[in-house]
Image (cartoon, rainbow, N blue to C red):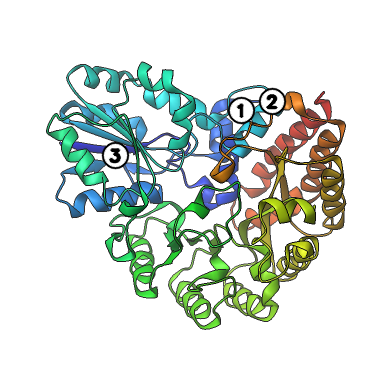
């Protein structure tokens, strides 16, 4: 048995039916669908052999690779099989994305349904596992890391209750080894370790993953050059991996035979290899030609910007043509955030680059139109309750959503969460919603409901159970629509 175990909660140990969009279902609270069936619809458990998952979250795989590189004896296990491996473990590392449902999507759905979201529920289930509690009594150390660690600052009592020994926030490749080593040696650990800028790893210090990642997700780089006030990622330096490094990880996933497809992950995939906000044609083309050649299971992007798409329509269409050789559509997440050019200029002036912030609504319409024409299906976010938001800003956002009604997409309004340079601002809460906010939420729900059948048809076209499942997804969307209408 290994001295170090790594795991994540059930909502993260899933491939979401090979569709990253369905992962958003974990942000919803329990509802009219029985929990066992809802989990099957949105986050079925990843396949495992003797408790060892066939794939795991990419961030967890990076931690695993770094610890192996430093000579640790580790095993990554499914959360449902912890008790089979934990008896001799000395350290348990837990990867988390949204442990308390404080992320924008989770807080919004929790406000609508008035319940704790599934992802928070299952994180609590993991932390309350009797096997962990028993192991803690004999000296097990628990270290938590991942994108959601900022939330522990708001949940100090939880940290104490579950005796979490160390919480690590930031890019931890240069510090994780010393923390796990200290835990193994019985040394004191800092309760909260925030990785400083000087400790941020250079490209050559970041190891390749050594086991498959869920849905073949592969990182293209880290950081962002847009500088939006409300985002944590913009505070990290922009670095792009060389193509050879990306190819090695793609090859590992493909050759494992355990994952289907590839999700290219970056804050703006369209800017891969660029030092500014203008896409690099040669680098982007070479990357996608390689990915399409190697993968039979389809390609998706984690994120891209509307400005980058709108800045080079010919290149975007070229990339789309490469991708659509083997699939009928592709998806990504994008941030619209607001339809107000004035508000965009205040909080995200570089999001429109190389265009002017004053042209934001035109950039959105152009970029979304290109996505529709090239069979890209974006999951778009709006931020409700931004600092300095005025009624006119909400009205302009509503006008923009109306202009996008013929664009195949999901548009999801999210309550403002204080992150990035705005982390000292107040949270936006349901009680602060105005009539215009409610109207915007319902407008977005109408838009999404209009497109949901078309998107479900695209998503499950090649699956034998698609027709059966579509009706349940549509039913859930209908309930959500009624819930939004009932918001007071």
In the rendered image, is residue 55 in sight? Answer: no
Looking at the image, is 169 positioned above or below residue 68?
above
* Residue name at image x 56 percent, y 41 percent: 419
* Residue name at image x 39 percent, y 46 percent: 170
Q: Which residue is mark 1?
A: 29
**In the image, residue 219 lies at what x, y percent?**
43, 60
Q: Nearer the viewer, residue 43 or 271?
A: 271
The crowd level at tag 1 (other Cα within 10 Å; few <14, some 14-19, many 20+) is many
**Helix, strand or loop at mark 1:** loop
First in residue order: circle 2 vs circle 1: 1
The answer to whether the residues at label 3 and label 2 have Cβ atoms under 8 Å apart is no
Q: Which residue is mark 3?
A: 6
The answer to whether the residues at label 2 and label 1 have Cβ atoms under 8 Å apart is yes
First in residue order: circle 3 vs circle 2: 3
**In the image, residue 40 lies at what x, y percent?**
54, 37
- Please tell me the numbered disc located at residue 113: 2
């Amino acid at each position: 048995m290994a001295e170090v175990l790594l795991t994540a909660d059930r909502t993260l140990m899933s491939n979401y039916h090979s569709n990253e969009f369905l992962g958003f279902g974990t942000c919803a609270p329990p509802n009219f669908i029985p929990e066992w069936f809802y989990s099957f619809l949105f986050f079925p458990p990843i396949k495992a052999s003797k408790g060892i998952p066939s794939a795991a979250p990419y961030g967890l795989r990076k931690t695993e690779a770094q610890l192996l590189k430093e000579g640790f004896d580790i095993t990554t296990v499914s959360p449902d099989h912890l008790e089979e491996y934990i008896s001799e473990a000395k350290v348990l590392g837990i990867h988390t994305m949204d442990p308390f449902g404080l992320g924008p999507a989770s807080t919004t759905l929790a406000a609508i349904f008035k319940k704790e979201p599934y992802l928070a529920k299952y994180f609590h289930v993991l932390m309350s596992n009797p096997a962990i509690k028993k192991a803690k009594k004999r000296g097990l150390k628990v270290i938590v890391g991942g994108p959601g660690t900022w939330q522990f600052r708001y949940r100090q009592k939880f940290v104490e209750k579950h005796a979490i020994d160390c919480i690590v926030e930031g890019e931890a490749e240069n510090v994780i080894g010393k923390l796990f080593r200290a835990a193994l040696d019985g040394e004191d650990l800092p309760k909260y370790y925030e990785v400083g800028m000087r400790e941020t790893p250079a490209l050559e210090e970041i190891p390749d993953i050594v086991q498959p990642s869920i849905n073949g997700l592969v990182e293209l780089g880290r950081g962002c050059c847009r500088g939006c006030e409300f985002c944590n990622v913009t505070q990290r330096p922009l670095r792009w991996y060389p193509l050879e490094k990306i190819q090695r990880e793609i090859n590992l996933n493909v050759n494992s035979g355990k994952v289907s497809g590839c999700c290219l992950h970056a804050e703006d995939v369209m800017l891969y290899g660029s030092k500014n906000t203008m896409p690099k044609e040669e680098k982007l083309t070479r990357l996608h030609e390689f990915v399409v050649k190697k993968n039979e299971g389809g390609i998706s992007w984690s994120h891209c910007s509307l400005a980058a798409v709108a800045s080079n329509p010919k290149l975007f269409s070229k990339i789309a043509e490469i991708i659509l050789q083997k699939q009928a559509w592709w998806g990504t997440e994008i941030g619209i955030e607001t339809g107000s050019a004035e508000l965009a200029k205040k909080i995200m002036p570089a999001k429109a680059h190389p265009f002017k912030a004053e042209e934001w609504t035109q950039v959105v319409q152009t970029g979304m139109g290109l996505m529709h024409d090239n069979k890209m299906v974006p999951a778009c976010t709006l931020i409700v309750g931004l600092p300095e938001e005025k009624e006119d800003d909400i009205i302009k956002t509503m006008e923009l959503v109306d202009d996008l009604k013929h664009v195949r997409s999901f548009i999801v309004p999210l309550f403002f969460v204080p992150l990035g340079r705005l982390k000292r601002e107040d949270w936006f809460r349901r009680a602060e919603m105005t009539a215009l906010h409610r109207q915007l939420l319902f407008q977005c729900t109408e838009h999404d409901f209009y497109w949901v059948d078309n998107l479900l048809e695209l998503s499950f076209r090649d699956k034998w159970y698609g027709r059966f499942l579509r009706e349940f997804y549509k039913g859930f969307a209908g309930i959500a629509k009624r819930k939004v209408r009932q918001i007071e």
